[in-house]
Amino acid sequence: MELYVGYFAAFMGTVCWVPQAWKAWASRDTSGLSLPANLMFLLTVSLWFCYGLMVGDWPIILANFCAILIVVSIVAAKLRYK
Amino acid sequence: MELYVGYFAAFMGTVCWVPQAWKAWASRDTSGLSLPANLMFLLTVSLWFCYGLMVGDWPIILANFCAILIVVSIVAAKLRYK
């Protein structure tokens, strides 16, 4: 049971920023997005990715690799349309 | 070494949304924030909190309890100033 909750949490944590990335690029309205917050979140998922590589945990590696791509696109939209 | 990376990632993942919450309440500019993304992220940190309770892991419980408070405040700002 814990495993299902953990896997669902990991899955949600990866896909949840897709609507934000979509909105940022589609609306070009990024004034309300905090650049420091998104840069720190990019650091966070990069650290989890490194942690996954260090301990050889594929779910962590894959989830955070996807998260890095999504968060990079949010940061790029923020820098492009600020 | 892995443990330090993991703890630093957990710490960053908790504090990184403080600037976003601050910005949302201070500027009242939340039009660029995606409500679905933030609701899904609230579900994510709530699931991690439940997972922490289930496996009795205090760092996960504490980090995600703080994250829930911060993300609730972002969602509240989005609903208040949309």
Image (tube, coloured by chain):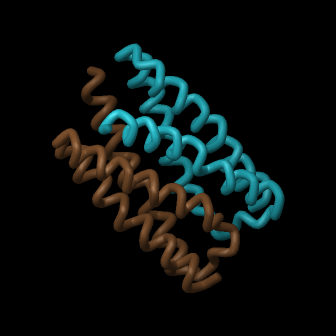
Chain colours: A cyan, B brown
- Seen at 57% across and 29% down, the residue is A65
Is B18 situated above or below A68?
below
Left or right of A82, for residue A69 = left
Q: Quadrant of residue A44?
A: top left
Q: Position of residue B37 (x, y in %)?
A: 60, 58
Query: Does residue A21 lie above or below B22 as drawn?
Result: above
Residue B24: percent from left, percent from top? 54, 74
Residue B70 picture quarter: bottom left
The quadrant of the image that shows the C terminus of chain A is bottom right
Residue beneath the point at 74% across and 59% down: A23
Can you give x and y, in whole percent of width and height, for residue B38 in the image? 55, 62
The residue at the point 38 percent across, 42 percent down is A5
Question: How many numbered discs, if any?
Answer: 0
**Closest to the observer, B15 or A9:** A9
Q: Which quarter of the rendered picture does the N terminus of chain A lie within?
A: top left
Residue most extreme to the front: A1
Q: Residue at x 76, y 66 (%)?
A: A29
Q: Position of residue A42 (x, y in %)?
A: 54, 42
Q: Name which quarter of the figure residue B72 lies in.
A: bottom left
Q: Compared to A6, does B39 lie above or below?
A: below
- Lateral position of residue A63 relative to residue A5, left or right: right
Instruction: Please give left or right for residue B45 compared with residue A21 in the image.
Output: left
Give whichever of A61, B22 is nearer the camera: A61
